[in-house]
Amino acid sequence: MFHAQGPLLQVDVGSRETREEDVDDVLGSFIGGRGVGTRLAHERIPFDADPFGPENRLLFSTGPLQLSRASFTGRTNCTGVSPLTDGLLSSNAGGFVSRNLAGTGYSVVELAGASDELLAVHVRDDGVTFEEVPDLAGATSSEVTAWAEDEHDLSEEHICCIGPAGENRVRFASIMTTESRAFGRGGLGAVMGAKNVKAITFDGDSAPEMEFPQAAMDLHRDAATSDSIMKRQGTTSVTDLGNEMNALPTRYFSERSFEGAEGINGDRVEEKKYKKGTCSQCAFACKLPTRDEERGIETEGPEYETVMGFGSNCGVDDIVDVMQSNELCDEFGMDTISCGNTVAAYLASEDEFGNADLIHETVEKIAHREGVGDLLAEGVARAHEELGVENWSVKGMDFSAHDGRALHGQGLGFATANRGGDHMYATFYAYEYPLVSKDMAFPPEGLSEEKVERLVWAENKRAIEDCGIFCRFSRGEMNEERFEALLDADFEDLLEVGSRVVELERHFNNQRGFDRGDDQLPYELEGLDEALDQYYEKRGWQPDGTVASPDSGTAAPADD
């Protein structure tokens, strides 16, 4: 089985010491990316760790595909305990930093401890340097990127950083890379802020060499020649479909379709797109550099989830207003989904849906924890009572689009996902719109046993993609044969690896008090309890949603 190569580099930002560790056994069993990050976190982060405490860790990891030239592989994983969900969480980001991380020669770089001074950490193949950067306090992501280029001759492709939101421990703060790409959901940017690390850079020429089969070039060719609408509109191409299916959350989840969808759909985004955008080595080029010259706004996106969060869910029908919200979140370093939903909750409490000026003002207040922004920076699950609105979240993570009240399998997927109300954990909505072939599609209504079985399969497959690391948008090009060729393993064996990843996440969270009571939804979904029983049985878990004894796949590493 192909897997990531290279040792783990532990970087203790408190003592400013580093140490290399051999993790070949973990790499061989969990491939790379999310799998390796989860396995290492399970052993190295105490089950009772405070997300903002020095005992929490951030594990940046690559997969074997970052050593190839295949499309859909420009991604990097980060794993840690989430301050939003209070559970173990992995997030991955696109852009270009993945191959520079691989260039250091390390498969995993772990940030541990906490610094007394604001730091930039520079990881290179010939050593690590710690730089105190008090002048970067409060700097935005673009300002940090400009500093790295001016002071260190490092382009945006080498840097992961936080904006003011991360420093201020906004619970949905992102880690930003390539300026506008984000380790978005779950607030890992706030963990980096708690460690007092403003930026980490990667550089080197020590990436191990690996030979990949012809399938890598075939994938690249097919990405280049695809006529997918996503090349023009990104994920916003699904806006009209979601609206027609009554699955587009609107006005803080009080409605499920938006009369103003035409003003924020894929056509409107395509009108504002002014050039192609892509990630490292990818010929699919689905990114969305957009510009509105009249208002002087330039950003990347928005993607569909941002169109939901800052568009329909806030009652906004002007794509330029959504573009501005998107750019503010990128600059301040915040997840656009959670920020948009939290602002929508505030608008609901104030009866101010559609007030774009108030939205943009509130985003800035959240990033700096000023006024009402201090409450909203805690996120929907912690702020809803004081706001007097419903808690539209699962496990502390507020919902993305693809409303589970219309797409019932996706609703179940929101409930079971270890990350909470997140559509990317299983992407089950794709089977219910459907965005897949007819033989794989399901009717949107109902929770059949076949749907439950497919959800387990989909969660395992998504985990393997995150180990590789493959982009979710490779769905149309990555069949089982290509998985087997690119990862040099039987597909069923790969799914078993994915299952172990999901189980380790679940076990870690069980030790923090999570159980079946957390696999619930804030709305009625007929058949949910029976479907949960079936889901746990198919995974071999206990009826209360806990894991008795996880399969770690390898012997435990030596204690620190």
Image: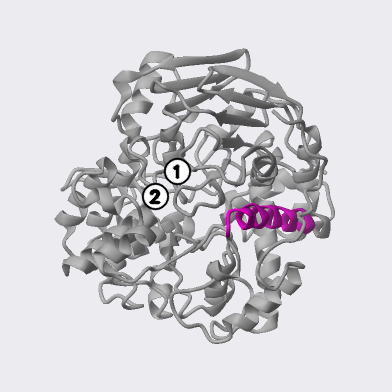
Give, as a single range, the part of the protein colored magenta. 495-513
Q: Secondary structure at mark 1?
A: strand
The residue nearer to you, when weighing 555 against 93, is: 555
Q: Quadrant of the C terminus?
A: top right
| Residue at mark 2 | 335
The three-letter code of the residue at mark 2 reads: Asp
User: Does residue 449 sit above or below 484 in this rendering?
Assistant: below
Q: Residues within 10 Å of mark 2 (few under 14, many from 20)?
A: many
User: In percent of the image, x 32 and y 78: which residue is there?
Assistant: 255
What percent of the width, then of the height, locates residue 515?
60, 65
Give the mark nearest the N terminus, 1 or 2: 1
User: In percent of the image, x 59 and y 73: which residue is there?
Assistant: 431
The residue nearer to you, when weighing 216 against 105, is: 105
Q: Quadrant of residue 510?
A: bottom right
Q: Secondary structure at mark 2?
A: loop
The three-letter code of the residue at mark 1 reads: Ala
Q: Which mark is residue 182?
A: 1
Dominant SS in magenta: helix
User: Does residue 275 sit above or below 87 in this rendering?
Assistant: above
Q: Quadrant of residue 252?
A: bottom left
Q: Quadrant of residue 314?
A: bottom left
What percent of the width, then of the height, locates residue 382?
36, 58
What percent of the width, then of the height, locates residue 106?
67, 26
Q: Quadrant of the N terminus?
A: top right
The residue nearer to you, when weighing 460 against 479, is: 460
Can residue 434 be seen here? The reply is no
User: Does residue 78 sit above or below 126 in this rendering?
Assistant: below
Q: Are marks 1 and 2 in contact (CB under 8 Å)?
A: yes
